[in-house]
Amino acid sequence: MLNMHRQVLILAGSQALFQSISVLIMTIGGLAGALLTPSLSLITVPLSMASLGTVLVMFPASLWMSRAGRKIGFITGALCGIVAAVISMIAMFHHSFILLCLGMFFLGIFQAFAQFYRFAAGEVALPAFRTKAISLVLAGGVVAALLGPFLASRGSVLFSVPYVGGPLGKRNLWSLPFLQHRF
């Protein structure tokens, strides 16, 4: 019983971090795209790459987790998120629109895996606790509504290169679900 509650809390924390990152990306993704784009008509391509990554990987992520298990799947997703943040930071430092698009694609992969947190909560909970477990995980959006914009405003001024702090914050946040799912 204690293990079930622990797992639900880990999933709820992971969901809060995932949604915080999503809010952060929506806040600074277009601005970073505008800073790096060779053409104003391409400003939202990095955000579109995140959506594309999610769409292309959602079904394979489901298959992977059914074969390897949720824990391995969530660790895989968190590692993709860390890769996304590192690539995005490099893109901002080197003023590379293509690298930003690649980093955002990896963000989409992370998001595909993270979409399964609520389902995992339903799987680990006993029937009497199931609806509450799913609700707790989805309540992470409340935390994200506060944390995401805060990170965007604070992170964007940490470095002399605009918007580098956002990917740094993403990397740090993605490291937390990775560490949570390892234990």
Image: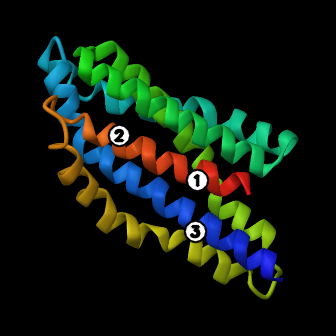
Q: Residue at x 68, y 72 (%)?
A: 8
Residue type, mark 1 in image: Pro
Left or right of 89? Residue 175 is: right
Q: Count residues near mark 3 (Cα–Cα under 10 Å), then give few for <14, some for 14-19, many for 20+.
A: many
Q: Earlier in the sequence, mark 1 or mark 2?
A: 2
Tell me the crowding category of disc 2: few under 14, some 14 to 19, or many 20 or more residues within 10 angstroms, Cα based. many
Q: Nearer the viewer, mark 3 or mark 2?
A: 2
Question: Considering the image in quadrants, where does the N terminus appear?
Answer: bottom right
How far apart marks 3 and 1 lie (CA) works out to 10 Å
Residues 64 and 152: in front is 152
Residue 121 occupies which quadrant of the picture? bottom right
As displayed, is residue 38 above or below residue 9?
above
Instruction: Estimate the spatial distance between the alpha carbons at disc 1 and disc 2, rounded to whole Å.
Output: 15 Å
- Residue sitting farthest toward the bottom: 128
Where is mark 1, residue-wise?
A: 177
**Mark 1 secondary-structure assignment:** helix
Q: Is residue 128 above or below residue 49?
A: below
What residue is drawn where x is 58% and y is 70%?
137
Could you tell me which quadrant the C terminus lies in?
A: bottom right
Left or right: 105 with respect to 6? Answer: left
Judged by depth in the image, the label closer to the viewer, 3 or 1, is 1
The amino acid type, in three-letter code, at marker 3 is Ala
User: Is residue 54 among the parts visible in the rendering?
Assistant: no
Which callout, 3 or 2, points at the residue further toward the start of the chain? 3
* Picture coordinates of residue 116, whole percent (x, y): 65, 54
Give the spatial CA distance, label 3 vs label 2: 22 Å
The image's mark for residue 12 is 3
Residue at the (22%, 27%) spot, across then down: 33
Q: Residue at x 47, y 58 (%)?
A: 17
Q: Which residue is mark 2?
A: 168
